[in-house]
Amino acid sequence: MAVTITPTPASGSVVATKTAVRFDISGGDPNDEASFDAGAYPTSPEFRYVLTMVEGGTEYGRSQVFGVTPDGAFQFNNYIFPHDGTWTCQLYDVTEGFTAVTSAATVVVTA
């Protein structure tokens, strides 16, 4: 399943320092089935993720570290972009390192 990041309100409708944006994540893998161990509990370790907000090559914000629901969903609420610009919102697997797991969502923020 492909991972998607959907901002609400949509890109272009966000006003810097005023609009609270919700990010809906879907399609994330909840567990690392490649590391299955019948003798361990849980039998498959949970993937851990973080969502970053980057503009002009600088990271200005990130979500808390989180796991997704069994159906691969997570919701990050109320991010307020600090200034206008074209932002890249990228999901990373932080279970063992810092690996991008999907194409980034682009959010255009107006002044």
Image (cartoon, rainbow, N blue to C red):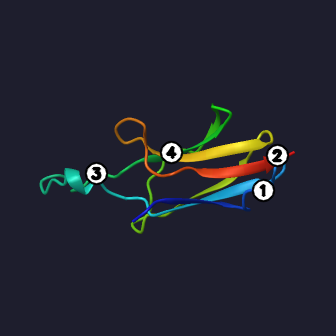
Residue type for callout 3: Pro
Give the CA distance from mark 2 to mark 4.
22 Å
Question: Is disc 3 in contact with disc 4, using a CB cutoff of under 8 Å?
Answer: no
What residue does disc 2 label? 16
Residue 24, x across and y down, in percent: 58, 61
Residue type for callout 2: Ala
Q: Is residue 33 visible?
A: yes
Give the CA distance from mark 4 to mark 1.
23 Å
**Mark earlier in primary sequence (3, 4):** 3
SS class, disc 3: loop
Q: Is 35 on the left or on the right of 67, as rendered?
A: left
SS class, disc 2: loop
**Mark earlier in primary sequence (3, 2):** 2
Residue 30, x across and y down, in percent: 37, 59
**Mark earlier in primary sequence (2, 4):** 2
Which residue lies at the image location 68% right of the left edge and 44% below the top edge? 87
Question: Is disc 4 in contact with disc 1, using a CB cutoff of under 8 Å?
Answer: no
Picture quadrant where residue 31 is located: bottom left
Residue type for callout 1: Gly
**Mark earlier in primary sequence (3, 1):** 1
Give the CA distance from mark 3 to mark 4.
17 Å
What residue does disc 3 label? 45
What residue does disc 1 label? 12
The answer to which of 55 and 75 lies nearer the viewer is 55
